[in-house]
Amino acid sequence: MTDFTSQFQAVKKSSRKLASIGDERVQDILFDLADLMVNQSELLIHENQRDLARMEESNPMFDRLLLTENRIEGIAKEMRQVAKLPSPLHLPLEEKVLPNGLFLEKITVPLGVIGIIYEARPNVTFDVFSLALKSGNGLILKGGSDADYSNRAIMSLIHQTLQKFNIPTEAFLLLPADRTATKALLEAVDQVDVIIPRGSQGLINYVRQHAKVPVIETGAGIVHTFVDAEADLEKAKAIVHNAKTRRPSVCNSLDCLLIHEKLLPSLPELIQPLLDCGVKIYADEKAFSSLPEIDLIQHAKGEHFGTEFLSLQLAIKTVKNLDEALEHIATYSSRHSEAIVSENQENLNRFLLEVDAAAVYANASTAFTDGAQFGLGAEIGISTQKLHARGPMALKELTSYKWVVRGNGQIRA
Amino acid sequence: MTDFTSQFQAVKKSSRKLASIGDERVQDILFDLADLMVNQSELLIHENQRDLARMEESNPMFDRLLLTENRIEGIAKEMRQVAKLPSPLHLPLEEKVLPNGLFLEKITVPLGVIGIIYEARPNVTFDVFSLALKSGNGLILKGGSDADYSNRAIMSLIHQTLQKFNIPTEAFLLLPADRTATKALLEAVDQVDVIIPRGSQGLINYVRQHAKVPVIETGAGIVHTFVDAEADLEKAKAIVHNAKTRRPSVCNSLDCLLIHEKLLPSLPELIQPLLDCGVKIYADEKAFSSLPEIDLIQHAKGEHFGTEFLSLQLAIKTVKNLDEALEHIATYSSRHSEAIVSENQENLNRFLLEVDAAAVYANASTAFTDGAQFGLGAEIGISTQKLHARGPMALKELTSYKWVVRGNGQIRA
């Protein structure tokens, strides 16, 4: 087994210098790299083709893996946007003078070294680099083996740019694309401050099982929308349709519609736009009886509740009242995004207060759970845990803080 | 093996109601409990005596375990202070209106359920309860077996008070004092949001190795103070003496003095107050040569650097300049508390910027790293990791946040 310790230590050590690069210089580096990747798009596409040649075109990952001129332009544009965001470093969070004259400041600092484990999406390599550099963090990347040629080519452009600006390249490490490297990363307690897995539930479970380093879990969204008795049906139709069909493969898409039993007569109208899009419905007894007998509509089984479909499928559960909806959500939600559609203010307020999720919505589509939509300027993932960061994570969420204490000889009694 | 799942689920479920108790009622509960523990101090002391009867008086844990009338009064006083702190819940962290009219609020919410694993200190049971209730969190406590009679008596007073106020007692669970319970707690991924171990490095290592639930590591402090060439010797003497001898057994106490080589001639004077207190010194070659030959002063061995002594022992390392001091600290520090004594502003600023620790001090004793000293009003532990909370943790650090999104039918394009 390869020993990565010395490489990890080099990342840790060189990462200490990143916080003092200065944000103007960080901007210059990112603009320079954005230009370079466009200029070198031929090279990137060439290496990307070597990856693609090993994959069937019918594989759903093929499209995620693919780099084109247009996509590279898009990645470069995003990098320039990140470059221009305000620096998240050295911001004062608190200031106080103690009675003994000690002056305390709580200021933001980089987390240190961030480990990212991800699958075959080469754009992530650029995205994560720009966020890490901007927030003064070193980076250890473990990409998918399917994208290894692409990732190596991207990393070589990154290192080339860093060298030009005299920044230590060792602070940004791309690991070999094998499980040995993953395991070493997960156990690098003294060298890595946090690991963020980006990918399938299987990957996230593996990371949770084996990590000794703190992890921020991202991704899995088992998302509900409760259409209350006093819902505006037109709003409900649009919101449910948007949340389910806009991009079914992403984590904020709708998985389970909760319908107040009083609204069952309107259920056929409510879900007609879904049926028009070919959404397969798993309806509980009461809902099933209210719906036409067509192939797209089937009886729900237990397993359909609490499932993240990531495709054109939807479970429907009938509830007697708000309490039953809250109970169902508390039981099955992954605490990502949850919505209520209602014109009853009291119910809206109770839902927003009592539902425990990263984002809770009143009369809006859950499709908005996203760093760019929330005005964070970027996104490194959507946290589904409560520690450190919840919901969309961007630059601020890649910082920690420290207490800076200035005295003139104070001692404690 | 006992199955704790249903008990954990009951904690999780009933904890959801805690955020809406209302802070006035929380205050009433804590005041009531403070009175009750004083009224029932005879009972508490009786049960505590049963624990003490199983321990040798010479055991250093004996004093930590001991409850007296005075100590109970002290615990009650602290509980009343926590009661009066501002509520950390439902505070707006951010507010924005998006161009499409969506109104976003980022507000503080409880973490959910907090697991605490601690050793034979019964006062922790009361302390942690008041912080958890005040921050709306459910609690699963795993205390040391040495304190089990005391902890059961304390928990019964807590439950008695909760019942009186009609708060679900299931939200606050004291586990049996055995390793089976610890293991179950560490693996309760869906029921527990964070585990905070309080105790020895051995306990913390065990938790890190076995936890599947997110952990906040607390405690271990390998603390340095660098006395620079341009230090004010009187300040340095007082600061070093205070940091080492005020309470040697706590985590913010000094472990290693870094001395600029130009100051070696003043080293005997600098450490005289330590010798007067019986501090055993492990000096590197250069420092050793500058010091008198007495029993308390020995040659440092490799193991003396990077050691948390928690007693009247101190390592001394001579450095050529600030860079060497920074390098030593980066190598051996546990990133808890680090100090510089100097009158050189440039060196002070570099030290405060470049040293990576929860608290960095210029010309002050590291003994100030403490929740109460920093004005947090209480303390549940001192985090030595960078995720979520760093340094002293109190009420605010026991919260997460959620995004509350109010719309009127918005869907995403």
Image: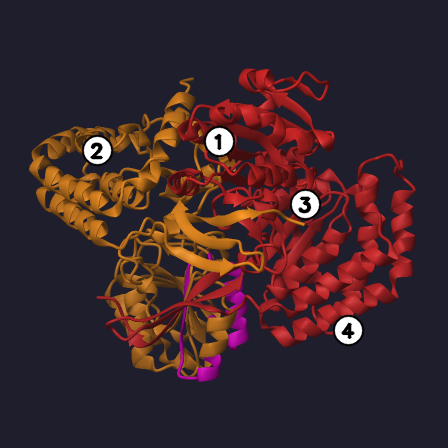
Chain colours: A red, B orange
Residue bearing the label numbered 4: A164
- Do the residues bearing badges 4 and 2 touch, measured as CB atoms within 8 Å? no
Q: Amino acid at mark 2?
A: Leu
Give the distance between the C-alpha atoms of the residues marked 3 and 4, in whole angstroms: 27 Å
Residue B226 horizontal/vertical position (percent): 43, 72
Q: In front of the other: label 3 or label 1?
A: 1
Q: Are marks 1 and 4 on the same chain?
A: yes
Name the side, left or right, on which B354 lies relative to B163.
right
Which label's residue is closer to the chain start, 3 or 1? 3
Between the C-alphas of marks 1 and 4, the distance is 52 Å
Residue B349 seen by the camera: yes
Q: Chain of mark 4?
A: A
| Whole-percent x, y for residue A286 in the image | 54, 17
Q: Which residue is mark 1?
A: A329
Residue A117 shows which numbered tag?
A: 3
Span shown in magenta: B318-347
Q: Amino acid at mark 3?
A: Ile
Mark 1 closeness class: few <14, some 14–19, many ≥20 residues within 10 Å: many
Give the secondary structure at mark 2: helix
Which is in the foreground here, disc 4 or disc 2? 2
Kindly state the secondary structure of the residue where label 3 is placed. strand
Quarter-of-image position of residue B246: bottom left
The chain containing the residue under callout 1 comes to A
Q: Which residue is mark 2?
A: B162
- Ranked by sequence position, the earlier of labels 1 and 4 is 4
Q: Where on the picture, by quarter, is residue A201?
A: top right
